[in-house]
Amino acid sequence: MEFTMIEAGWLSILPPLIAIVLALITKEVYSSLFVGVFSGMLIYAFSTGGSVISATALTFDMMYSKIADNAYMIIFLALLWAVVMLVSRSGGSLAYGKWAGKKIKSKRAATFATSLLGMLIFIDDGFNCLTVGTVMRPITDRLRISREKLAYIIDATAAPVCIIAPVSSWAVAVASEVSDTNGFHAFLSTIPYNFYALMTILMVFVISFTGLDFGPMKKAEEKAFKETQGKEQTEESGDNKGKVIDLVLPILVLIICAILGMAYVGGFFKGVSFSEAIGYNPTAGLSLGAFAGLLTAGILYLPRKLMKPKEFIDCIVSGIGNIVPPMLILILSWTLGGVCRQLIGTGVFISGFVEKSNLPLALLPALIFVIAALMSFSMGTSWGTFGMLIPIVTMICETEGAGGFLIPALGATLAGSVYGDHCSPISDTTILASTGADCKHIRHVETQLPYATLVAIVCAVGYLIAGFAGSPWIAIVAESCLLVGAVMVLGKLGDKIFNRTKTNI
């Protein structure tokens, strides 16, 4: 479906702003997103001589278009949640929780294990969020780690890891945007300058090691410490026949077949390079992997009579039903992103500031980081943000005297894009992280925002240092010291509010 973009000027930032503010005030995402979408359509319709009726029709046209564009994502999520429900109903999660409970006996070990698992699944951020949440939630619940904390760790080891992993769908997407004969080499060169990804990973491990928290996360941890959540155990307590393999094998097959599926769909077995193949249509390959996991569960459970055939099918239907609420949020956020990018030119308006900037070149990486962060936060998409900004940044750095700032500027673009995506309430990754952790979406946004913003502030300082020093390494050392110090100070201040029991960390 074809849409014609207009230049709405400052009005183009109203729809995402309305959606975000309403979501934060009302703590209700569905209506907030729809109001944001409809306000954008009203701006477009009135600017093109339309009416309220045409704005309504356009709203559903855009929604239809986004559902069609993301059909494989919908199929993948439905199949994945069917697998999740089957694993849970079989007793595999409970068995794994009991087994892991003998190995993981402290909050520190659980948060470390969650962080490491998140870093290992670097092929796709959405797959990362749902898989890590499914595997680790029973353990973190038992150790009374808040769902908000689990959601943060999942989110912080999803996009930030994928954006610096050479073998991922993200790497291919970024490389394809760089107008260079060797875009993949340019992507590799940006990794040391992707300060937000690097510092976020450091932040996760510092918090896991020290057990220090601050802000709304502190209160969430206090509540979880006083309460026994036990949701997973309650759901699974009806069947104790499950074994660890009932969890591990379907998930392992899913992961392996997902990677092979992405390679197959992208033409790897016909001579296309692996990195290009997995980036061709990753969600199609992931759907193949999820279906393989579903078949594995059937072969594993039905002959052993862990569940009857009818119960098996009912479980699949129930799992698909559970994904409907977060899927509705995804569809609305995709629609809002489409309105902003395809109709009213939100990204073009914001990115125009970059082109018109007359600031010293040494400030360029820091400025681009801030602009990318604002764009990504407003639109809820990192891919859409760097897709719009990378060509502009490349053109700016082609001017005389600016060539040496290309790689730092590209790194800042990717970093800012990931920050906005990481903490935006309308980001699909944020939605999937809260879904994977079974955490209320708006609570996840509220609790992780101070953490993500602290890292972003430290990174902004780092880009100022890198711009004047001409090297990422001095900035990385300075950022690391600053971030660790800030966490220590804020964490200690937080301990005055929440008297943490040290023996439980």
Image: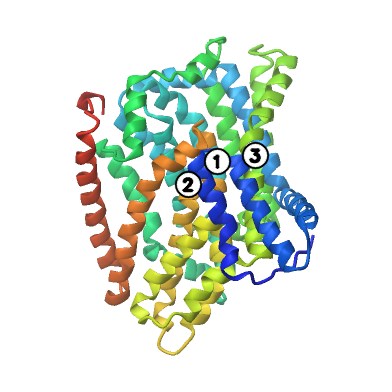
Question: 385 or 85, which is in the foreground?
Answer: 385
Q: Is residue 478 above or below residue 213?
A: below
SS under mark 2? loop
Residue at image coords 40%, 23%: 100
Tell me: 276 left or right of 421: right
Query: Is the residue under label 3 in contact with that under label 2 (CB below 8 Å)?
Result: no
Left/right placement of residue 63 relative to residue 251 reads right
Residue marked by disc 1 = 432
Please tell me which of labels 2 and 3 falls first in the chain.
2
Residue type indicated by callout 1: Leu
Q: How many marks?
A: 3
Residue 168 visible in the shown view: no
Q: CA distance from mark 3 to mark 1?
A: 9 Å
Going 32% across and 74% down the picture, which residue do you hit? 467
Residue 432: percent from left, percent from top:
55, 41
Q: Quadrant of residue 146?
A: top left
The residue singled out by tag 2 in the image is 158
- Please report whichever mark, 3 or 1, sits nearer to the chain's N-terminal start: 3
- Give neighbour class at mark 2: few <14, some 14-19, many 20+ (Cα, 10 Å): many
Q: Position of residue 195 (x, y in %)?
A: 36, 60
Callout 1: few (<14), some (14-19), or many (20+) C-alpha neighbours within 10 Å?
A: many
* Quarter of the figure with residue 175: bottom right
Q: Quadrant of the N terminus?
A: bottom right
Location of mark 3 (residue): 327
Point out residue 422 in the picture as x, y percentages from the top left corner: 47, 50
Q: Residues within 10 Å of mark 3 (few under 14, many from 20)?
A: many
